[in-house]
Amino acid sequence: MRKGTVTEKLTLTMGVLLLSCTSCCTSDHQVSPWGAARRPPLAAYIAPPDLDAQLRAIDVEADELGLELEVELRGALPRGQGEVVLRGYAGTDALGRRTSAVRVATPRGVVMAAGPLDSGRVDRSQATQLVPSLLPGEEPGATEQLGVFRSGTDLNGDGAPDVVLRNEAGELEVWAVHPFGAGAARYAVELAMPPRFALDVDQDGTLELAGRTRRREGDPIAPDLLDVASFEGDRYTHRGSAARAFH
């Protein structure tokens, strides 16, 4: 019998209160255990907070899946709710292709389980690679991990630590960890093309997501169009004030 994954174990232990979101928790580890809901169920607050226990559960699952830890980042939940730990993993699927996975844990639970993608999965659009930071740092030899706009910090000023993921096509997703550490939800993005990098167009210390049309090789007169989305309310949109000023 196949051993249950972290996401599946969470779903089972939460019982009836989580039936409304179990349809979002697939065996392919594609989403947060709470789906797109901003508010976690009451059951998430019943068990005593234990970050070490959540990390041990992730270690067991990573070992079962043959994943190797590549990067670990730590951040703080607001209002003294404890730490949030972000882990990026790498592995190899049955076809010998490189795979990636992300696990995010708080004292309340494993709030994000993305990847690895199954070898037979046709749709490869799901983001499963952790992006440590969106812009390189200014230090000599700086890497993504030493850069600015780091995963595990509040990237848009809404008070929640954020997690940045990338898919195989280079497209970005930004997720918010619930302020009480009991769930995660993906921010909506309104852009004419998928976001692939970040800018700080108005130099206010808050990132804007950006996408660019790809030029056809050998076509020097093809248009180079850049679309920018700033954070407004609960989403990134090219209709935001900073984005409109840039355009």
Image (cartoon, helix red, strand yellow):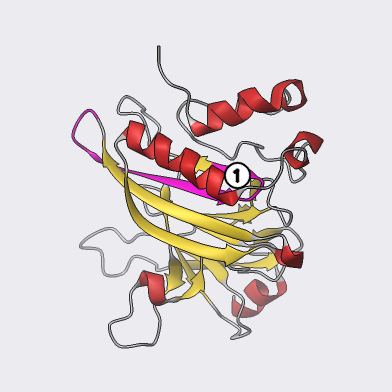
Whether the magenta-drawn stretch holds residue 239 is answered as no
Left or right: 224 as drawn, with respect to 9? left
Q: Nearer the viewer, residue 206 or 160?
A: 160
Q: Position of residue 194 (x, y in %)?
A: 49, 54
Q: Main secondary structure of the magenta part?
A: strand
Q: Is residue 233 above or below residue 188?
A: below
User: Residue 129: x percent and y percent?
Assistant: 40, 51
* Residue that badge 1 annotates: 111
Q: Above or below — where is 1 with respect to 14? A: above
Q: Residue at x 45, y 69 (%)?
A: 134
Left or right: 107 with respect to 168? right
Q: Could you tell me which quadrant the N terminus lies in?
A: top left
Image quarter (top left, top right, bottom left or bottom right) of the C terminus: bottom right
Of the residues shown, which amino acid type is indicated by label 1?
A: Val
Q: Examine the rendered structure and indicate whether residue 79 appears above or below residue 61.
A: below
Residue 246 figure quarter: bottom right
Q: Nearer the viewer, residue 194 or 94?
A: 94
Q: Position of residue 103 (x, y in %)?
A: 48, 46
Residue placed at 48% from the left, 34% from the top?
A: 29
* Residue that protrudes farthest toward the right in the picture: 42
- Identify which residue is drawn at 37% across, 70% down: 144
Where, by quadrant of the figure, is residue 128 drawn? top left
- Read off the magenta span: 94-112
User: Regarding mark 1 in the picture, which secondary structure is present there?
Assistant: strand
Left or right position of 206 against 142: right
Q: Is residue 108 left or right of residue 122?
A: right
